[in-house]
Image (tube, grey):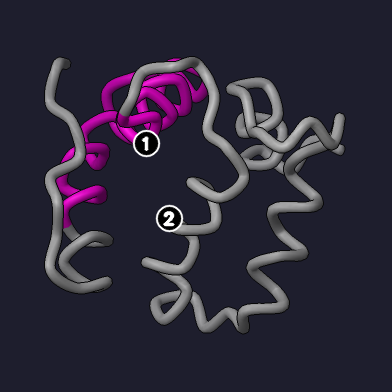
């Protein structure tokens, strides 16, 4: 799947566009493969990681959908970035998504 996240005008469009790209993965692939593809889509520059600021921007786009405050967004990023290197790699993303602590 070589389809990347399109730019969206508002937060609801972003969430809907992302979900439309990954919903088939939820049914047709194993859990780890699904999360790898999600990460690949979110890692728009294909660096193999997302800077914490990029992750914050993504969370800010969906925070209305999940009713998060700015402080909660910062706390989530701090929680995800286990090694505190200022970026989130796939392993950190995956462990967060499957709630593996």
Circles 1 and 2, Cβ within 8 Å, touching? The answer is yes
Secondary structure mostly seen in the magenta stretch: helix
User: Is residue 44 found left or right of 2 in the rendered image?
Assistant: right
Picture quadrant where residue 4 is located:
top left
User: Where 69 sits versus 72, above or below?
Assistant: below
User: Where 97 sits versus 39, above or below?
Assistant: below
User: Where 82 sits versus 13, above or below?
Assistant: above
User: Is residue 101 found left or right of 99 in the rendered image?
Assistant: right
Q: Nearer the viewer, residue 101 or 28?
A: 101
- What are the residue bounds of the magenta stretch? 17-44
> Magenta includes 4?
no
Residue located at (54% from left, 57% from top): 56
* Separation of marks 1 and 2 at Cα, in angstroms: 8 Å
Q: Which mark is residue 42?
A: 1
Q: Residues within 10 Å of mark 1 (few under 14, many from 20)?
A: some
- The residue carrying mark 2 is 58
């Amino acid at each position: 799947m070589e389809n990347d996240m399109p730019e969206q005008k508002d937060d609801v469009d972003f969430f809907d566009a992302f979900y439309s790209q990954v919903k088939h993965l939820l049914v047709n692939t194993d859990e780890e493969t699904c999360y790898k593809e999600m990460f690949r889509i979110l890692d728009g520059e294909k660096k193999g990681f997302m800077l914490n600021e990029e992750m914050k921007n993504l969370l800010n786009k969906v925070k209305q959908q999940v009713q998060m405050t700015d402080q909660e967004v910062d706390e989530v990023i701090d929680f995800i970035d286990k090694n505190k290197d200022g970026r989130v790699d796939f392993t950190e993303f995956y462990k967060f998504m499957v709630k593996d602590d």
